[in-house]
Amino acid sequence: MERMRLQDTDDAVSGVLALRQLLTSELGTVERLIRRVDKNPEPGNDETRELIDTYDRVRTSLLSGLASVDEVLGWVHMLAEKDSDGNEPECVRSLPYVNVLPRN
C-alpha cells in the first residue's frame, strides 16, 4: 500500500474531521427533535408517526455516515507516512485504527 504524504494526511484529516463534526451536530439536532415529538405524542396521529419514522431514518443514516467517517479516519491513520524515526504525524495520533487481519 502506498503511504500518504504528510501534507495530504493533514488535509485529509482536516476535511474528514470537519465532515464528522457536521454529521455529529446534525445527529444531535435530530435526536432533540425525536425527544420533542416523543414527549408530546398525539395518539392515533398518522402525521406524528410518519414524522418519527422520518427522524428515525435520518438518525440511522447519520449514524451510518459517522461509522463510515471513522473508518476513513482509520485508513488515513494506517496509510499516513511516518517520519525518519518511525513516528506518526501529530494529526493522526488520536485517530481510530483499522483492524487489518492477515489472510490465511
Image (cartoon, rainbow, N blue to C red):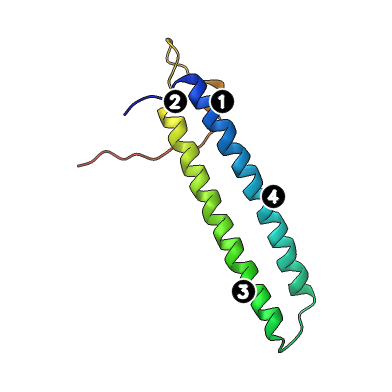
- Residue 99: image location, x then y, percent: 39, 40
Name the residue tied to disc 4: 25
Relative side of 1 to 10, left or right: left
Name the residue tied to disc 1: 91
- Residue 84: image location, x then y, percent: 42, 10
At x 71% / y 67%, what residue is drawn?
Answer: 34
Q: Marks 2 and 4, how far apart in space?
A: 27 Å
Q: Secondary structure at mark 1?
A: helix
- Visible in this render: residue 29? yes
The quadrant of the picture occupied by the N terminus is top left
Name the residue tied to disc 2: 80
Furthest residue toward right: 40
Mark 3 surroundings within 10 Å by alpha-carbon count, few (fewer than 14), some (14 through 19), many (20 or more): few
Which amino acid lies under the numbered mark 4 shown in the image of this protein? Ser
At x 58% / y 56%, what residue is drawn?
Answer: 62
Name the residue tied to disc 3: 53
Q: Marks 2 and 3, how far apart in space?
A: 41 Å
Q: Marks 4 and 1, how far apart in space?
A: 22 Å
Q: Is residue 76 above or below residue 49?
A: above
Specify the label residue 46 is tagged with: none
